[in-house]
Amino acid sequence: MKVTVVGAGAVGASCAEYIAMKNFASEVVLVDIKEGFAEGKAMDLMQCASLNAFDTKITGTTGDYSKTAGSKVAVITSGIPRKPGMTREELIGINAGIVKEVTANLVKHSPDVIIIVVSNPMDTMAYLVHKTSGLPKERIIGMGGALDSARFKYRLAEALECPISDVDGMVIAAHSDTGMLPLVSKATRNGVPVTEFLNDEQVAYVTEETKVGGATLTKLLGTSAWYAPGAAVSVLVQSILCDQKKMIPCSLMLDGEYGQSDICLGVPAIIGANGVEKIVDITLTDAEKAKFAEAAQAVREVNGDLKF
Ligand SMILES: NC(=O)C1=CN([C@@H]2O[C@H](COP(=O)(O)OP(=O)(O)OC[C@H]3O[C@@H](n4cnc5c(N)ncnc54)[C@H](O)[C@@H]3O)[C@@H](O)[C@H]2O)C=CC1
Ligand SMILES: O=C([O-])CC(=O)C(=O)O
């Protein structure tokens, strides 16, 4: 099955690389606006095929969306990343126009496509795709929670001084420095609540470092991260293409779930061949419910800046 990745920059190329390396897609089409850039990235990646033993065909195009026709999944990574000191929300002015235009081109050539939105501010960009694409809500997925949960597990394992594979945990709510909600109450080390091992100070450190995970990397790198974002997208794409029905937190259009409507926010969902197969309603503590509502309010304000 064919996957399109729009934006052949840092995140887009990483998405294409991880998808190809996992060898579950027949073709990945990279699209970029910069002349020759997607073609070059595709060629470089294809020259890894014999070295890394994958058969996925990777092609590139400068803006010719006819090459994306019949895509099962399209990933939108086009747009600018933040620089140190910026918030994701500050990217809305440039990225909204790009995401809207790219969405229209994708849907024109692949009316049955499932869109994964990566460009920031992601929750608002996912909302924009809902409002402008005409696609059913099951076929629009914002990627944030998969990445934020991976960062949560990284920080938990660091605090617990244990392998990351011993740790489980999930981050929901907004993909923003203040609106992320790492669910400490549900995080475990081999099934045992992490709160049995970590004191309040350690828990507060893990929570805060998780929330600013993207900002920390942006400060270190001078631009935002790409390896873990690409890997997180590849997990979502694989769950769709292979109908794995994994439970993954994603930014989805809510219609009463978690007390919210007409907003995209990170919630756990079953992701399979049809896209979003079910939003999973989990029990939150009162404090978590309050934080979820606070995050929703902040995202709603950013959504208010959109012009359709
Ligand atoms: N949701 C998430 O978890 C994450 C989101 N991001 C976001 O992903 C986006 C991309 O980040 P990077 O790849 O680091 O940026 P980048 O600058 O390396 O790549 C972006 C690419 O988009 C292309 N582009 C711009 N306008 C286009 C258009 N109209 N059509 C096709 N291509 C176009 C550019 O030419 C560039 O190659 C940013 O908005 C960033 O904030 C990044 C990491 C994680
Ligand atoms: O931090 C950023 O701007 C990019 C992003 O969303 C992330 O890495 O989580």
Image: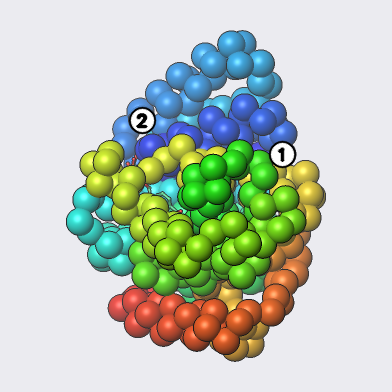
Q: The residue tagged with tag 1: helix, strand or loop? A: loop
State the image coordinates of residue 173 (x, y, percent, origin top left).
51, 72
Q: Which residue is mark 2?
A: 37
Instruction: Name the image quarter holding the C terminus.
Output: bottom left
Residue at 61 percent of width and 70 percent of height: 185
Label 1 Cα crowd, 10 Å radius (few <14 / some 14-19 / many 20+): some
At label 2, the amino acid type is: Phe
Depth check: 307 or 149 in front?
Answer: 149
Residue at 56 percent of width and 27 percent of height: 58
Q: Is residue 106 visible?
A: no
Q: Which residue is mark 1?
A: 1
Measure how far apart labels 2 and 1 are at the Cα level: 23 Å
State the image coordinates of residue 78 (x, y, percent, origin top left).
39, 49
Mark 2: C-beta under 8 Å from nearest atom of ligand 1: yes
Label 2 Cα crowd, 10 Å radius (few <14 / some 14-19 / many 20+): some
Depth check: 55 or 271 in front?
Answer: 271
Above or below, 207 relative to 280:
above
Above or below, 137 relative to 5:
below
State the image coordinates of residue 282 (x, y, percent, origin top left).
70, 75
Q: Could you say which disc has been placed on residue 288 in the image? A: none
At label 1, the amino acid type is: Met
